Amino acid sequence: MRSLIHLRVALALAAMLALAGCLVSETPVLDAKTGKARPFRDGDFLACPLEDGEIADGADCDRFAVERQKTRDYLFLTEGEEPARLRFRKIARGGYAVQSAEGDSFVYYYGKRRDGGLLLIMMNCPELPAELRARLIARGDLETDDDDFEVCAVKTLRGLVEPAKAYHRGDVRQMMDAAILITPAQPLTEME
């Protein structure tokens, strides 16, 4: 089985701190108490990249399994690959702050219900409303080393939840080129 290339592109490549504008942290912001939302049931799913906000005709979607853990996080599994570990916090009806463990760091996404699945969008610091970003930095909820906000480090739960709520309200331009749609997969049938 081939790897979850699109999921890995959207999730794993975002772990590179050089990726412009992403929200990251060196330690997890969500834990078993603060990230216990359950947007998925165990089972098989498809991850499809979006083009102009829609699944492109002939899109190369990847199949993977989801397992909920007793620790209240999820493993996204594909044969022969390191599992992706995600944790979700419900921030509004149909909206989630999402934490993805990526090697030695964590990358943050906004998730929203769509088309019977969950749309994951990488949260982008420069796209946050300037007033919100400035307030979060002044309070120590976010940290950045430059005026271009190439990387914003999430320091607190509020530093994650407030940007996710801004995405949910539509206050942020959603970059669909950094988004995937995760939907339940149809059962595989044997070919005769």
Image (cartoon, rainbow, N blue to C red):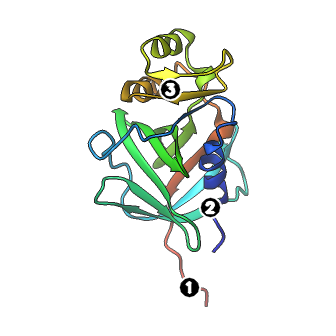
Q: Label 2: state its secondary structure.
A: loop
Q: Label 1: state its secondary structure.
A: loop
Q: Total number of numbered labels?
A: 3
Disc number at residue 190?
A: 1
Identity of the residue drawn at 40% across and 37% down? 29
Residue type pointed to by label 3: Tyr
Q: Position of residue 167 (x, y in %)?
A: 50, 26
113 up-or-down from 183: above or below:
above
The quarter holding residue 4 reads bottom right
37 lies left or right of 164: left
53 up-or-down from 62: above or below:
above
Residue 31 can be seen in this image: yes
Q: Earlier in the sequence, mark 3 or mark 2?
A: 2
Identify the image quadrant of the N terminus: bottom right
Name the residue tied to disc 2.
4
158 lies left or right of 190: left
> Would you say the residues marked 2 and 1 are in contact, meaning their CB atoms lie under 8 Å apart?
no
Q: Position of residue 49 (x, y in %)?
A: 65, 49
What distance separates the C-alpha of mark 3 from that of mark 1?
42 Å
Q: Earlier in the sequence, mark 2 or mark 1?
A: 2
Q: Position of residue 114 (x, y in %)?
A: 49, 42
What distance separates the C-alpha of mark 3 from that of mark 2?
26 Å
Mark 3 or 1: in front is 3
Disc number at residue 167?
A: 3
Mark 3 closeness class: few <14, some 14–19, many ≥20 residues within 10 Å: many
Identity of the residue drawn at 33% across and 49% down? 38
Q: Position of residue 19 (x, y in %)?
A: 69, 36
